[in-house]
Amino acid sequence: MHPSVKVLAHKPLISFIGKRVWPATAGPSHPHPAAPPEWQKFFSEQAVPHSSPRTLQDHAVFLEFWDAPARFSKPSSRYLEQVEIDAILSGGASLR
């Protein structure tokens, strides 16, 4: 018979130093350092700080899928036949 083993509390092998600190505001926008020079130039010309997020949307938002137009519910490939549906639902067992 083995003597009972004293169970020690689990101590993870990784330890984190300090608490997480998130900045209150976003830092300045800048291009990626590995970006090509022409992209960096274009970025610096186009970078404009946004004061607030856009509140007006230029497209319709649908909360339920059935509210969306019919073009979103049409399958892009083709309709499945009943035999194919049965094969899919059975995991292929109905093929033999």
Image (cartoon, rainbow, N blue to C red):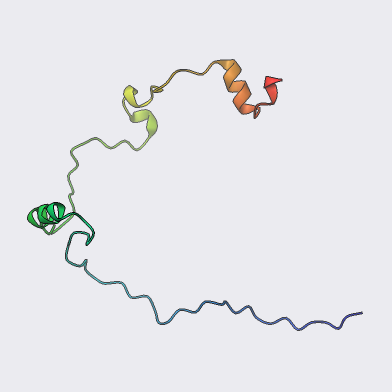
Residue at 62% over, 23% down: 87
Q: Report x, y in % for residue 10.
A: 63, 78
Residue farthest to the right, as pictured: 1
Front residue of this view, candidates 38 and 72:
38
Q: Report x, y in % for residue 72.
A: 34, 27
In the rendered structure, the answer to whether residue 77 lies left or right of residue 8 reads left
Front residue of this view, candidates 23 and 94:
94
Whether residue 22 is situated above or below residue 53 in the rendered picture = below
In the rendered structure, the answer to whether residue 57 lies left or right of residue 64 reads left
Front residue of this view, candidates 47 and 85:
47
Instruction: Quadrant for residue 66, please give it.
Output: top left
Whether residue 13 is situated above or below residue 79 in the rendered picture = below
Front residue of this view, candidates 68 and 11:
11
Whether residue 14 is situated above or below residue 48 in the rendered picture = below
Residue at 31% over, 72% down: 22
Instruction: Quadrant for residue 53, please give it.
Output: bottom left
Whether residue 55 is situated above or below residue 18 in the rendered picture = above
Assign the C terminus to one quadrant of the image: top right
Assign the N terminus to one quadrant of the image: bottom right
Residue at 24% over, 35% down: 60
Q: How many marks?
A: 0
Instruction: Quadrant for residue 76, please give it.
Output: top left
Residue farthest to the left, as pictured: 45
Q: Report x, y in % for residue 40.
A: 14, 56
